[in-house]
Amino acid sequence: MKQIQMVDLKSQYKEIKSEIDNAIKEVIDSAAFINGSAVKNFSKNLEKYLNVKHVIPCANGTDALQIALMALGLKPGDEVITSDFTFIATVEVVALLGLKLKFVDVDKNTFNLLPEEVEKAINPKTKAIVPVHMFGQNADMEEIMNIAKKHKLFVIEDTAQTIGAEYTFENGKKYKSGTIGTIGCTSFFPSKNLGAYGDGGAIFTDDDELAIKLKQITNHGSKVKYFHDEIGVNSRLDSIQAAILNVKLKYLDKYISARQEAADFYDRAFKNHPKIKIPARDKQSTHVFHQYTIQLSGIDRDALKEHLNSKDIPAMIYYPYPLHLQKAYKYLGYKENDFPITEELSNKVLSLPMHTELSYTQLKYITETVLEYAKR
Ligand SMILES: *Cc1c(COP(=O)(O)O)cnc(C)c1O
């Protein structure tokens, strides 16, 4: 059996090696390393895939979130509501811009923002909601968009883990993750579902004016070279990364299916187990399984992780410590028990190997090892 990886980027590369190598070579031959045609082609193709008017590429997912907040003209002291159970990047940019963070607890089954908690956190200073589509599944966008409309709030979707996931509203309308709110932000970090061979990110919007503004901010606040209408940043997607992503985008749906098949295997193995809770599947969202995350009760999570590691099975804890208790965010004044679900999840979650190249033999070995341990 091939060595099991948390994310097997080497095996995935082997399958498409000649296409990727050619794409990289073309960029090098053209020497158009910055803003080359590969970047434009990729943006166009991603717009088509997502059915969104504008894709603005940038340097990484964290920048995408920062630029989105900058483009909305939020002022220091304005409040932004987001999930307590997410990767730090989501909240860091809010703090960096001098905006006030308002954490909200998550659903214990889907790991996504609880709309009723969002509504409770709203006050006259609230300007935006940042739903994080956790582990590959869209947040409850039906409710979140209703709340946003009612209170006239911007919605910035963090779809770093969920590119390609589809959301169906009660009226039957379907959208790709990141194209529902005011702005969508994603990451092409290598281990993400659409991963580059380095850093990358993108911002999505249907709003023409906002698109101009977003583009301008990524380019030093400038539309016309050496004339700066506002304070911007330097955030670009490399042509080489765009060329790689252009190849991989063609395979994204196939990659999603491979992840879903692996998840189905895990589901079947662990379903109805008294100590292992499988990730819930939302009725309105497809799940693209950036992570397959189980919750353990009556099993020492950390001991199981070590046991798996000793059997050459990697497993990871996303995320081991709630954001509201992190040292850097002490100034917000949150304390223990403020977000009980996130606190509980931090102690219970374990993510199993999840990628596009998992074999039947590997999945069988992983699930049997977990189930064997759970008998103890
Ligand atoms: C990865 C990730 C980001 C940040 O993306 P980078 O490209 O690493 O900057 C933001 N939010 C979430 C939820 C992520 O998983």
Image: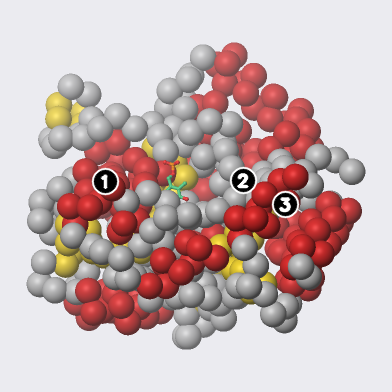
Q: Is residue 68 visible?
A: no
**Are the residues at dot 2 and dot 3 in contact (C-beta closer than 8 Å)?**
no
Q: Residue at 41% of width from left, 66% of height from top?
A: 343
- Which residue lies under the disc numbered 3? 307
Kind of residue at badge 3: His
Q: Position of residue 339 (x, y in %)?
A: 34, 70
How far apart marks 2 and 3 lie (CA) works out to 36 Å
Q: Which labelled disc corresponds to residue 328?
A: 1
- Which residue lies under the disc numbered 2? 249
| Rendering quarter of residue 113 | bottom left
Q: Residue at 32% of width from left, 82% of height from top?
A: 116
| Rendering quarter of residue 324 | bottom left
Q: Earlier in the sequence, mark 2 or mark 3?
A: 2
User: Badge 1: how crowded within 10 Å, few (<14), some, or many (20+)?
Assistant: few
The one of 376 and 40 positioned closer to us in this rendering:
376
Q: Considering only vertical position in the picture, is 263 above or below 310? A: below
User: Which quarter of the rendered picture does the C terminus lie within?
Assistant: bottom right
Q: Considering only vertical position in the picture, is 129 above or below 94? A: below
Q: Position of residue 289 (x, y in %)?
A: 62, 60
The colour scheme is: secondary structure
